[in-house]
Structures are given as C-alpha cells and as structure tokens.
Image (cartoon, helix red, strand yellow):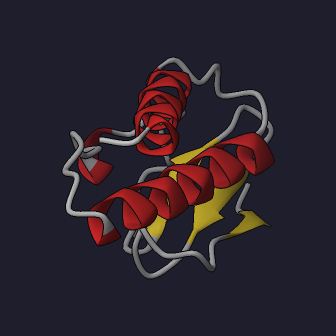
Amino acid sequence: MTLEQYNQERHAEKVRKQIATWDHNDADLMRDLLIDFANTRETLERDRICIADIDGSSLPSEPFPEGFDTMGYWALDKNGYAVRGISWEEHELDVVKIK
C-alpha cells in the first residue's frame, strides 16, 4: 500500500465516524459526508483496497413523518431537510425540505 492509499483509507475511516456521529443538525453536511465517503471508497476500490462499508439502512436520522414513503430518502435533519437520492452511494444526492 502506498502512502497516498494509506492516507485515503484513514480519511475514509474518519468520514465514516463523522457520518455515524452526525448530530442531525445539517442535512447538507450529511450529504457532503456521504459523497466524500463514496468518492474515497471508489478510489480505493480501483486500487483493489477494500474498506468497511456503511449500512445505508442505519444512517443517523431524525424520525421521518408517519406514513412518509422513505424510499430514496437517507437522513432527515432537525429542521425538516432530508438527504435524497436513488442510493446513498450515488454522487448525485440533494437536500430537500420535507416538513
């Protein structure tokens, strides 16, 4: 493993921890962290380095409103903004107001 790969692996672990401890205050931050993690993981996988993944079904989030179809929604912040995209691993996530 090169020094650059090692640094990317450490960066991915740091971002994974930031995702896991997200404080639910800013959906834009969660979107940026998810995109950063996906980009870093993609780079490492091209170099055939596997890193621990994130379970998209257990991302930290405020509860979604009862009856809300959460398909494609990944995290909700305290202000009613949600990270949305086909998959949390996509590079094209956006943030929308849902409540």
Residue 75 vs residue 47: left or right? Answer: right
At horizontal 40% and vertical 74% (from top left) the residue drawn is 87
Residue at 37% over, 73% down: 71
Residue 17 lies, in percent from the top left, at: 46, 21
Is there any visible trace of residue 77 in the rendered image? yes
Would you identify the image quadrant in which residue 30 lies? Answer: top right
Q: Report the quarter where the N terminus lies.
A: top left
Residue 68 visible in image: no
The x, y position of residue 46, in whole percent, is 32, 71
Q: Residue at x 53, y 48 (%)?
A: 75
**Quadrant holding the C terminus:** bottom right
**Relative vertical location of residue 56 with respect to residue 39 in this rendering, above or below:** above
Q: Quadrant of residue 44?
A: bottom left
Give left or right: position of 67 versus 65: left
Percent of width and height locating residue 95: 74, 64
Q: Nearer the viewer, residue 91 or 1?
A: 1
